[in-house]
Amino acid sequence: MANQKSAILLLADGRSFTGRAFGFVGETTGEVCFNTGMTGYQEILTDPSYCKQIVTMTAPHIGNYGVNTDDVESDRIQVAGFVIKEETEIPSNWRSNQSIGQYLNDQKIVGIQQVDTRAITRHIRDHGAMNSIISSVDLDIDSLKEKLLKVPSMAGLDLAKEVTCPTQYVWNDTKPSSNDYKIAAIDYGIKTNILRLLESHGCDVTVFPATVSSKEILNFNPDGVFLSNGPGDPEAVTYGIKTVKELLGKKPIFGICLGHQILALALGAKTFKLKFGHRGCNHPVKNIDSGKVEITSQNHGFAVDLDSLPSNVEATHVNLNDDTSEGIRCTDISAFSVQYHPESSPGPHDSRYLFQQFIELMESNSA
């Protein structure tokens, strides 16, 4: 039975929503954002890119198919908090191990339900993403406002260090290593399905912490370098930008999401914070080369400034909702990246070709 304890979601501008406790009874803070995906809530919860964020789901019923041990993108829930309209307490799926409410409670993730998620989403769209607090233990608005004042802004936050692996490790999902390409993947908050897809394309992947140096990567001597997704402000990941800058022209590079932004910054471009970000499974992106429209999975709050691209970098993809950068490539060295998530977990498979493009880049570099 649903928790009947009251809970409050308070936004930094003073807007509040009263509902019922969902998941763990307690208190949490983070930047509130929204995701428009109809499915994939377990992958969203476990995506490291959501570190320090309170995610609002726009779909009205969450938990319909429960949760399981396979559909995870990391080893734990990564969101700071979870906001939904209504939990499905009795999930219906043969793969389900438990309900989403139990899953959140077991990992001590505070949530709120029975709130108007449509109103929350419209408020964020109008006023922008902002800090917020969910509490089911303190229902005093003035007290919650005081706590919110102490929460740092997402702008300027380096969160890659909080979600990266502590030491390097070899990824092998299914069988002993026998692949053709040796990949160094820099973990700024990498998703499991990216590793699976690299492996399925014939890659042996060794994952390195976000703070790895260019010297360590070059001593490893990979065929290519992968820059992962991750949370926070890309400009704050100064050590990552330095490493990538020192790798430019020495190894083929492929970046996704935060990795795209770090590559752009290493090349001399600039980034900026979006008003409310792009998060969902159905964002239209135009491939500038082919003219085709790809439906993409996205999760980011910052973007690369297209007007700041240096002369040796060209745009390859653009977002059709707001004309922001969705992909770049270098014209004189082997490096490219996309802002969206071609590993699409969850989401459509329109952009899976990018992994093959990385393979072809490595092949041409070794020829």
Image (cartoon, rainbow, N blue to C red):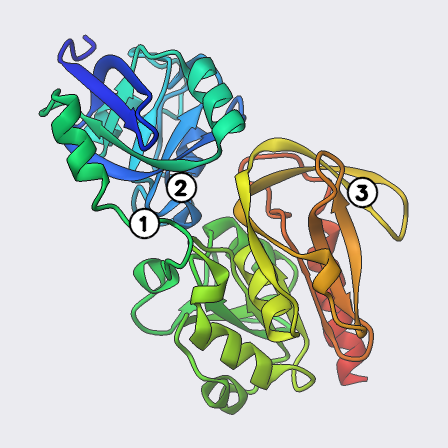
Mark 3 = which residue? 286
- Separation of marks 3 and 2 at Cα, in angstroms: 29 Å
Mark 1 = which residue? 75
Q: Is residue 12 above or below residue 272?
A: above
- Separation of marks 3 and 1 at Cα, in angstroms: 33 Å
Image position, residue 204 (x, y; %): 55, 70
| 135 left or right, relative to 243 | left
User: What residue is drawn where x is 70% and y is 51%?
Assistant: 325
Tell me the mark number nearer the camera, choosing from 3 and 2.
3
Q: Earlier in the sequence, mark 3 or mark 2?
A: 2
Q: Residues within 10 Å of mark 1 (few under 14, many from 20)?
A: few
Determine whether label 3 and label 2 are within 8 Å by CB.
no
Question: What type is the residue that disc 2 sits on?
Answer: Val
Tell me the mark number nearer the camera, choosing from 3 and 1.
3
Where's the N terminus, which quadrant? Answer: top left
Residue 151, can we see it?
Answer: yes
- Separation of marks 1 and 2 at Cα, in angstroms: 7 Å
Question: What type is the residue that disc 3 sits on?
Answer: Lys
Residue closest to the far right = 290
